Image (cartoon, rainbow, N blue to C red):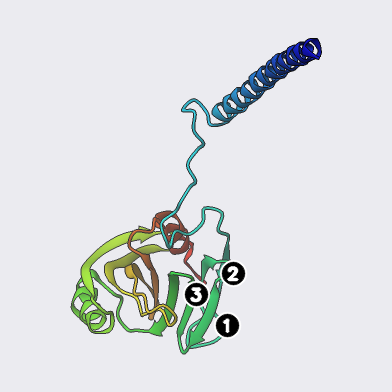
């Protein structure tokens, strides 16, 4: 009985050694596998060894792939012009004014008959005071004469608060560009607006440069 007991102990020791060896091999294989995955992840992350950061645009940025379509009024006092507006934006019209909106951005087009062409002086003395009384927290007005493809135009830039969001009540600080085009007794005011931190220089240039008299 004692001999049988010894062999039993020896067998248990051998079995434990074999098991330990197998565990070591398995552990080594697992370590190699994780190292390979880590290496692959580092390679995918580029030279810095980390994934590229997710791109984030400020609220109000118009996408680079935004398409534009020509708009020409079909009713109202004056229809002799066309201008490109962002495709797919919501449109509303009232009297001689048409507005296109999308999220935080806005394009407003107003046409009217006028006997005199706008000048930097007339916009400064007449339009600026009007807007100061209409736009919440109106500020930083700047009037200048610029050139677009349609010819010379008076540009008024300023800032103001948007209306409160009907759901959240949030108010956005907006930047405005107001272009006053004039020809043969007709004036068209093109106003482009969006959040002050949005980078919409290129889209707004596309719209203002697209204005054409017909």
Where residue 18 sits, quadrant-wise, is: top right
Who is closer to the viewer here, 118 or 20?
A: 20
- Whole-percent x, y for residue 114 in the image: 34, 84
Q: Are marks 2 and 1 in contact (CB under 8 Å)?
A: no
Give the mark nearer the N terminus: 3 vs 2.
2
Where residue 27 sits, quadrant-wise, is: top right
- Whole-percent x, y for residue 183 in the image: 39, 74
Q: Are marks 3 and 2 in contact (CB under 8 Å)?
A: no
Circle 2 Cα neighbour tier, 10 Å, few/some/many (<14 / 14–19 / ≥20):
few
- Whole-percent x, y for residue 3 in the image: 79, 9
Circle 1 Cα neighbour tier, 10 Å, few/some/many (<14 / 14–19 / ≥20):
few
Mark 1 secondary-structure assignment: loop
Q: Residue at x 72, y 19 (%)?
A: 19
Query: Which circle, 2 or 1, is nearer the viewer?
Result: 2
**Residue highlighted by disc 3:** 100
Q: Name the disc covering residue 88, or none.
A: 2
Q: Name the disc covering residue 144, or none.
A: none
Q: Residue at x 41, y 56 (%)?
A: 58
Separation of disc 3 and disc 2 at Cα?
9 Å
Q: Is residue 176 above or below residue 115?
A: above
- Whole-percent x, y for residue 179 in the image: 35, 69
**Residue highlighted by disc 1:** 74
């Amino acid at each position: 009985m004692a001999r049988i007991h010894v062999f039993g102990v020896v067998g248990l020791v051998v079995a434990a050694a074999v098991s330990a060896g197998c565990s070591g091999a398995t552990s080594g294989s697992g370590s190699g596998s994780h190292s390979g995955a880590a290496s692959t992840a580092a390679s995918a992350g580029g030279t810095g060894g980390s994934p590229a950061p997710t791109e984030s645009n400020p609220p109000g940025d118009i996408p680079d792939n935004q398409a534009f379509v020509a708009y020409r009024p079909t009713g109202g006092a004056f229809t002799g012009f066309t201008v490109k507006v962002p495709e797919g934006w919501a449109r509303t019209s009232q009297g001689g004014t048409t507005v296109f909106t999308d999220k935080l951005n806005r394009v407003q087009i107003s046409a009217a008959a006028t006997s005199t062409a706008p000048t930097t002086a007339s916009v400064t003395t007449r339009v600026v005071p009007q807007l100061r009384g209409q736009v919440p927290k109106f500020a930083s007005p700047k009037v200048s004469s610029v050139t677009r493809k349609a010819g010379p135009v008076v540009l008024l830039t300023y800032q103001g608060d948007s209306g409160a969001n009907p759901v959240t009540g949030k108010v956005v600080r907006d930047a405005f560009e107001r272009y006053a085009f004039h020809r043969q007794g007709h004036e068209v005011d093109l106003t482009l607006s969006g959040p002050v931190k949005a980078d919409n220089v290129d889209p707004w240039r596309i719209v203002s440069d697209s204005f054409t008299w017909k």
